[in-house]
Amino acid sequence: MAAKKDIRSLTIDELKEILEENSFQSFRAKQIYHWLWKKSSHDFLSMHNLPEKLLTFLENNFVIRKIEISRQQKSKDGTIKNAIKLFDDLIVECVLIPSKKRITACVSSQVGCSLNCKFCATARLKRMRNLNADEIYDQVVLIAKQSQDFYKRPLTNIVFMGMGEPLMNYKNVTKAIEMITSNEGLGMSSKRIVLSTSGVPKMIKKMADDKVKFKLAVSLHSAIDETRTSIMPFNAKMDLSQLRDSLVYWYDKTKSMVTYEYVVWKGFNDKEEDINALVNFCKKIPSKVNLIQYNSINDPNFIQASDETLSKYISLLEKNNITATIRMSRGNDIDAACGQLANK
């Protein structure tokens, strides 16, 4: 007997075709899609406006895969980290981050990661597979429910800053975002979604060509090639000149500002030349800088820089009319902060 097909892997046109081939009316596809992506249903029998014969057909031929919370931890600052079990028993993590003005979902796009950034715990896992679009979408649905359950407030923002490199899973990430933002799905605003990448020039250009509406952040950490390559080895093949060109292309096409995420480490990128290089890089297109508090992964090679160094960064960036902020760590007592997600 053939394995049941994951119904959420089908486009609405593919679903219509299957229904017509089996003597069902094609308009039922829109109803089914409404249950799957608007109502976030994981049960065919809950689709009460479908005829019994069609429900039986769906039950016999398709499955709606769903994620489950394997473990949940709550930080003293209110952050909630979820270890999520997928249909094949692999685990990823997603995080709810509350603040006064917003509630943010930090979601994962891969099991493990394709890249090998030395300061990131996720990178120490091998990449096992890409997440499907429905698995990404389901993380958002889960955190939206937690937001209401724990804080009585709606989810407001989504960041692709969890496990994995989103641009190495572009097709599924953009399909998930489509279903999160469309009127046929959750109807969230694209402007409240940030995709964070380590910097894949070819895919940044593709995003620009595709005229995506979400925001772009780049995990930079150094604007000097040799320095960046030492902690982000893929930079040897996709260097800063290629990254810069792709970002200029992005801005020319989208007119959307880029955010650079930047951790400053003691003895690594805390010198005057590092600051000047960042300033020069930022001048290529309108951009802003998030200086991120380093979150330990128990590696003695990485130590948070001093407050004095951060002040120097802020001062010189602002002197050059570049917006800069210091982003304080959230959830680091439960290993939920940036760079700490690692399937523990």
Image (cartoon, grey):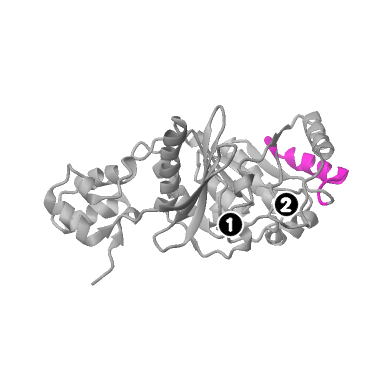
Q: Residue at x 62, y 52 (%)?
A: 340
Position of 66 relative to 259 (above/below) = below
Q: CA distance from mark 1 to mark 2?
A: 31 Å
Which residue sits furthest bottom? 1
The quarter in which the C terminus is drawn is bottom right
Which of the numbered marks, if any, corresponds to residue 241? 2
Assign a secondary structure to mark 1.
loop
- Magenta extent: 268-290
What residue would you read off at disc 1?
A: 342
Q: Earlier in the sequence, mark 1 or mark 2?
A: 2
* Residue 328 picture location, percent across and down: 68, 37
Work out whether residue 329 or residue 261 is closer to the camera in this orientation and state it.
329
Instruction: Give the amino acid at mark 2.
Output: Ser
User: Residue 49 vs residue 155: left or right?
Assistant: left
Which of the numbered marks, if any, corresponds to residue 74? none
User: Residue 245 vs residue 85: left or right?
Assistant: right
Q: Residue at x 55, y 37 (%)?
A: 78
Magenta span includes 274: yes
Magenta span includes 281: yes
* Residue 257 picture location, percent across and down: 62, 36
Instruction: Give the amino acid at mark 1.
Output: Ala
